[in-house]
Image (cartoon, rainbow, N blue to C red):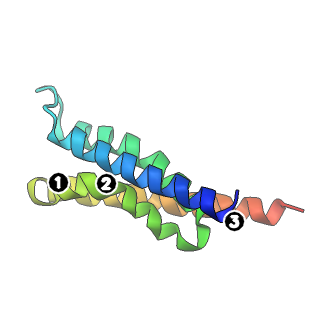
Amino acid sequence: MNVGSRLAVTIVLVLATGFWGVVVTFSDSPTSWSPGMVAAYVAVWHIPGALIVGYLYPRKWWLGLLVCWGALLVMAVSAPGIAAATLLVAGVAAYLGRALAMRLARRAP
């Protein structure tokens, strides 16, 4: 994948997952959902995005944290614990994407 394609995929992922984070955190969740359930729902969208960004940019894996911008924008004030957990999980996912890319690069002929 060339540099332009990687950049385009990364920008689309960051914008899409960030926007979805805003939508999910502003939407009315079912009353039976706990804050942990809301955080899990938000993370379902951010983990794959962070993993892919970490894979595409292994040396700059921390860019995977950008996928959380929407959720962090909303939850930083209203639910800072959930925001921190979401950021932590996205960071771990981005680092795992980096590790996968590095491992596959070592195996390539």
Disc 1 to disc 2: CB gap under 8 Å: yes
Q: Quadrant of residue 67?
A: bottom left
Q: Which residue is situated farthest in the right direction here? A: 109
Residue under circle 2? Answer: 86
Q: Which residue is situated farthest in the bottom direction here? A: 59
Residue 45 in percent (x, y) is at 39, 42
Residue 24 in percent (x, y) is at 23, 39
Q: Which residue is situated farthest in the front direction here? A: 4
Q: Is residue 86 above or below residue 33?
A: below
Q: Residue at x 53, y 72 (%)?
A: 60
Q: Residue at x 33, y 60 (%)?
A: 87
Nearer to us in this view, 88 or 53: 53
SS category of the residue bearing label 3: helix
Q: Going from the N terminus, do you reach mark 3 or mark 1 first?
A: 1
For residue 105, the mark is none
Separation of disc 3 and disc 1 at Cα? 33 Å
Separation of disc 1 and disc 2 at Cα? 10 Å
- The mark total stands at 3
Residue under circle 3? Answer: 102
Residue 49 placement, left or right of 43 = right
Residue 97 placement, left or right of 50 = right
Q: Going from the N terminus, do you reach mark 1 or mark 2 first?
A: 1
Q: Amino acid at mark 1?
A: Met
Residue under circle 1? Answer: 75
Q: Amino acid at mark 3?
A: Met
Q: Nearer the viewer, mark 1 or mark 2?
A: 1
